[in-house]
Image (cartoon, rainbow, N blue to C red):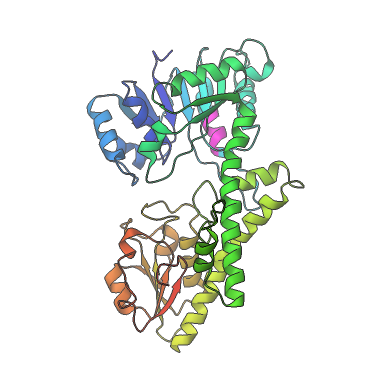
């Protein structure tokens, strides 16, 4: 089944670890990406993202000659699509990257291949891929037509946690949804090579919806915590104390509030459910709107803190924003509320100096780098020079900071670290 190797399209936070997992079992893998710099880095044995143990796995794969990165689509026995699936400005799914990958794969098909979509997608996307291939290759019979197909299509959503990907990519259960039972079985053969968890077979649309459901569940629970934080602040209570006490109930486990929700999954995927059933997804929409509103609440707190220092915009006020990533101890800035808060603060208060502290990056992202009042700073510099210190991400590097270190500064603590 794998005589012509496996092609993984998209060498980001999911695609590259998937390459490593496959090569660990002796399979020949070609990684495909449109970014020439990413391809060059990988071919040089370097990993362009921060993920524990990924660098060792990729270096080993390169040394064994099992992994090659390229910008050109090869012929392969299996194609794994792991490209971004963002949404548009009106929260509609944007499938242009999936379609581009499909259009690059279609000319390479000879019959018998397996095409697996790993990108989290709205229900029906795998069937769309089948239709797109059929339009480009009328000589092939695709599974959406019914009967025996020449190419097997399935959806297998990733479900790994950044910072633990090289553990969970092997141990987590996997859902494999085919456009036919045979498609599901053929795709499952790929994952049985390296997955030690259970492999659950279903249809493609159910697999797509299951992944969205997982992330919407998380989003709704985070929204509850964030709304609770708003309520407690309004009536003068410590939300972290309230949650801690409530969680002593044997059947209650409330999450912690924060500055919003980030990452490519939880901040994005619930909108795919809303777009699929806008009249029915009332709670899912409300949760998204609650979490999307949190950065503005934090910005108001920062403005209030600056006012307490007696400094107005343009009078030399300095704000240290601790953390830009979407969660602790990673370098992933995708959909990060911390990044959004820092950038909005700098734009709305051009006379305020903003010190961005992110120990997991070496340079500011493009949006911040373009703002003249923002600089990337070390923690020590930020604590020494700031009038207001804002904790946005509870990185391990920040947990050693004490209230004594912060004496004389106004604080905005979105993580409850300095209560």
Give the percent coordinates (x, y) of residue 40. Answer: 31, 38
Give the percent coordinates (x, y) of residue 375. Answer: 35, 69
Rendering quarter of residue 386: bottom left
Residue 258 can be seen, yes or no: no
Predominant secondary structure, magenta span: helix
Q: Give above or below for 77 relative to 52.
A: above
Image position of 212 (left or right of 376):
right
Give the percent coordinates (x, y) of residue 350. Answer: 47, 76
Residue at image position (58%, 51%) is 219
Q: Give above or below for 48 relative to 107.
A: below
Image position of 136 (left or right of 108):
right
Q: Quadrant of the N terminus?
A: top left
Towards the viewer: 128 or 132: 128
Q: How many marks?
A: 0
In magenta, the rendered stretch is: 97-102
Rendering quarter of residue 23: top left
Residue at image position (47%, 67%) is 414
Q: Give above or below for 325 relative to 37.
A: below
């Amino acid at each position: 089944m794998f005589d012509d190797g496996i092609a993984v399209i998209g060498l980001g936070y999911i695609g590259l670890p998937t390459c490593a997992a496959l090569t660990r079992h002796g399979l020949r893998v070609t990684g495909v990406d449109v970014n020439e710099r990413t391809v060059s880095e990988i071919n040089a044995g370097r990993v362009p993202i921060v993920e524990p143990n990924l660098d060792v796995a990729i270096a080993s794969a390169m040394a064994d000659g099992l992994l090659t990165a390229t910008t050109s689509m090869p012929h392969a026995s299996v194609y794994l699509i792991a490209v971004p699936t963002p949404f548009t400005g009106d929260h509609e799914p944007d499938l242009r990257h999936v379609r581009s990958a499909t259009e690059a794969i279609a000319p390479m098909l000879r019959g018998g291949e397996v095409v697996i979509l790993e990108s989290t997608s709205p229900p029906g996307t795998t069937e769309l891929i089948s239709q797109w291939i059929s339009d480009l290759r009328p000589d092939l019979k695709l599974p959406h037509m019914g009967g025996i197909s020449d190419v097997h299509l399935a959806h297998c959503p990733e479900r790994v946690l950044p910072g633990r990907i090289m553990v969970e990519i092997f141990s987590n259960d996997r859902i494999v949804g085919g456009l036919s039972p045979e498609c599901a079985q053929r795709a499952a053969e790929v994952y049985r090579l390296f997955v030690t968890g259970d492999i659950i077979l279903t249809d493609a649309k159910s697999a797509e919806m299951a992944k969205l459901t997982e992330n919407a569940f998380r989003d709704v629970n985070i929204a509850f915590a964030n709304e609770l934080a708003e309520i407690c602040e309004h009536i003068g209570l410590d939300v972290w104390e309230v949650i801690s006490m409530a969680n002593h109930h044997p059947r209650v486990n409330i999450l912690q509030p924060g500055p919003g929700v980030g990452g490519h999954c939880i901040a994005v995927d619930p909108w795919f459910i809303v777009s699929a059933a806008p009249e029915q997804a009332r709670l899912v929409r409300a949760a998204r709107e609650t979490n999307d509103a949190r950065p503005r609440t934090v910005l108001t707190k920062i403005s209030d803190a600056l006012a307490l220092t007696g400094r107005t915009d343009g009078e030399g006020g300095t704000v240290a924003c601790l953390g830009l990533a979407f969660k602790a101890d990673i370098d992933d800035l995708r959909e990060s509320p911390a990044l959004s808060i820092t950038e909005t603060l700098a734009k709305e208060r051009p006379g305020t100096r903003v010190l961005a502290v992110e120990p997991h990056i070496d340079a500011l992202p493009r949006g911040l780098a373009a703002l003249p009042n923002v600089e990337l700073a070390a923690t020590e510099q930020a604590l020494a020079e700031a009038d207001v210190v804002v904790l946005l991400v509870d990185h391990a590097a920040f947990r050693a900071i004490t209230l004594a270190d912060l004496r004389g500064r106004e604080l905005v603590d979105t993580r409850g670290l300095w209560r």
